[in-house]
């Protein structure tokens, strides 16, 4: 959906430079078609197997994006009360919401119970006890899955790997049956599922398929023991190509492998993809402010910074950076840096890239997931606008912050 036509970079049928000129930079721009295509790849690959694709809201929680997915029939995986609020604002169906997270507060649980969400993915017995007591007080029943920790190594960045025993997430799969047994004592809880999520940006699916096998086997043992396990939730985590050498798994092929392992056993399959739905569908567009040469290095100073996109600084992650207008000038090698007062403020190091001049626009690719959601006001920078492209049309789904936004809620 992002491609050159006559040397100009387009998103669907709109030249990105037109948007950048009108909306200003930096700005995030998303392809609605690509988001929907990715969602449908999940939905269609699961075919007639009963399933629910619950988009992981934390990857990109802008209401306009959530509304697009809600209209396509998506469910949602949330990790906070704030995300539930956003889903409801976007017209999402609470009966298709699952609530994950290791530290849900009583207030968040009460909110979720009052909105009658589908189920809770629980991570400890103490959490089960709290949900049970809050459900009792309201006179309702709550459905839950235990998020089991299958003890597989996701082989991804350590900060986003979650499926090993030493991680804070989930309940050790070897203890899960005991916990489900004890949970029978909670009178307001129904054990309806088993869930797992082993990590993010997985480029190899064997760890997650290993986890799927372990979860299916556990669910069958639980059923034999009389638990009403209806759904299996395999989390998210499918990786995307941040550079051409990355070979992420195809959504459809991966889901086929899952389907084969689950088919015919009478389970509803749930998945919680985030990055693989929105990541490749978004770019951060920035303008070159200065070229600066020191004795050792060439710097391209741009108007986007680590507060707008923190992934390079936080994970040392690579994002391709390409010009909105291609020229014949020979490439340069330089660091792309922002205006923030930190050496960690870079978008690329030692990158061979277009020979840009001040005023030129650049697109930081594959920025649709964990981009805007991780942005901040550091250095009192206003967070950028977000724009959704639909064919020939585009619209602002979040306006650029103004100076008043920066001090909202503050007093002298
Ligand atoms: C972050 C997260 C996801 C989504 O992960 P992606 O890598 O963005 O697909 C799904 N489920 C849970 C529980 C998560 O914490």
Image: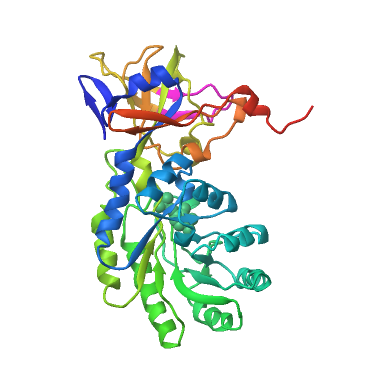
Report the residue at 27% width, 59% height from top. Answer: 254
- On the rendered structure, is 66 left or right of 254? right
Residue 297 visible here: no
Location of residue 248 in the rendering, given as x and y in whole percent from the top left corner: 29, 49
What's the image's color scheme? Answer: rainbow
Location of residue 42 in the rendering, given as x and y in whole percent from the top left corner: 30, 55
Residue 139 visible here: yes
Please state, as top left, top right, bottom left or bottom right, where the C terminus lies in the image.
top right
- On the rendered structure, is 223 left or right of 188? left
Identify whether 121 is placed above or below 30: below
Q: Quadrant of residue 300?
A: top left
Extreme residue in the bottom direction: 225
From the viewer's side, name the closer residue of 404 and 378: 404
The question of residue 389 being in magenta is answered with no
The question of residue 347 being in magenta is answered with yes
Query: Which corner quadrant of the figure contains ligand 1?
Result: bottom left
Report the residue at 57% width, 53% height from top. Answer: 80
From the viewer's side, name the closer residue of 257 and 400: 400
Location of residue 125 in the rendering, given as x and y in whole percent from the top left corner: 61, 73
From the viewer's side, name the closer residue of 357 and 254: 254
Identify whether 212 is placed above or below 53: below
Identify whether 90 is placed above or below 211: above
Please state, as top left, top right, bottom left or bottom right, where the N terminus lies in the image.
top left
Report the residue at 36% width, 70% height from top. Answer: 268
Which region of the structure is painted magenta?
A: 335-349
């Amino acid at each position: 959906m992002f491609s050159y036509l006559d040397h100009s970079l387009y998103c669907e049928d709109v030249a990105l430079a037109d948007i950048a000129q009108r909306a200003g930079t930096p700005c995030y721009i998303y392809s609605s078609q690509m988001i929907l295509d990715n969602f449908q790849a999940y939905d269609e690959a699961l075919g007639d197997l009963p399933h629910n694709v619950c988009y992981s809201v934390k990857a990109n929680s802008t209401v306009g994006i959530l509304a697009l997915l809600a209209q396509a029939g998506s469910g949602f995986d949330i990790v906070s009360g704030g995300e539930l609020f956003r889903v409801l604002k976007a017209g999402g169906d609470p009966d298709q919401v699952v609530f994950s997270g290791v530290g849900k507060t009583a207030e968040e649980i009460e909110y979720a119970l009052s909105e009658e969400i589908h189920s809770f993915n629980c991570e400890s017995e103490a959490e089960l006890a709290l949900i049970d007591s809050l459900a009792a007080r309201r006179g309702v029943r709550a459905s839950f899955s235990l998020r089991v920790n299958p003890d597989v190594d996701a082989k991804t960045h350590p900060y986003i790997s979650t499926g090993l025993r030493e991680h804070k997430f989930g309940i050790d799969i070897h203890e899960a049956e005991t916990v489900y047994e004890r949970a029978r004592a909670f009178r307001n809880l129904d054990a309806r599922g088993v869930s797992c999520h082993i990590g993010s940006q997985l480029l190899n699916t064997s760890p997650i398929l290993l986890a799927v096998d372990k979860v299916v086997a556990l669910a069958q043992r639980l059923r034999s023991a009389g638990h009403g396990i209806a759904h299996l939730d395999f989390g998210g985590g499918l990786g995307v190509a941040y550079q051409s050498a990355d070979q992420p798994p195809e959504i459809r092929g991966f889901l086929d492998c899952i389907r084969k392992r689950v088919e015919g056993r009478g389970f509803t399959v749930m998945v919680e993809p985030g990055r693989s739905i929105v990541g490749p569908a978004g770019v951060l567009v920035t303008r070159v402010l200065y070229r600066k040469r020191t004795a050792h290095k060439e710097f391209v100073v741009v108007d986007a910074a680590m507060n707008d996109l923190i992934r390079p600084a936080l994970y040392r992650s690579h994002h391709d950076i390409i010009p909105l207008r291609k020229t014949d000038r020979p490439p340069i090698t330089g660091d792309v840096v922002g205006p923030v007062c930190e050496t960690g403020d870079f978008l690329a190091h030692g990158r061979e890239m277009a020979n840009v001049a001040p005023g030129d626009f650049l697109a930081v690719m594959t920025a649709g997931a964990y981009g805007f959601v991780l942005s901040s006001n550091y250095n009192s920078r206003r967070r950028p606008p977000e724009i959704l492209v639909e064919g020939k049309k585009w619209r602002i789904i979040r306006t650029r912050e103004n100076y008043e936004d920066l001090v909202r809620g503050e007093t002298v």
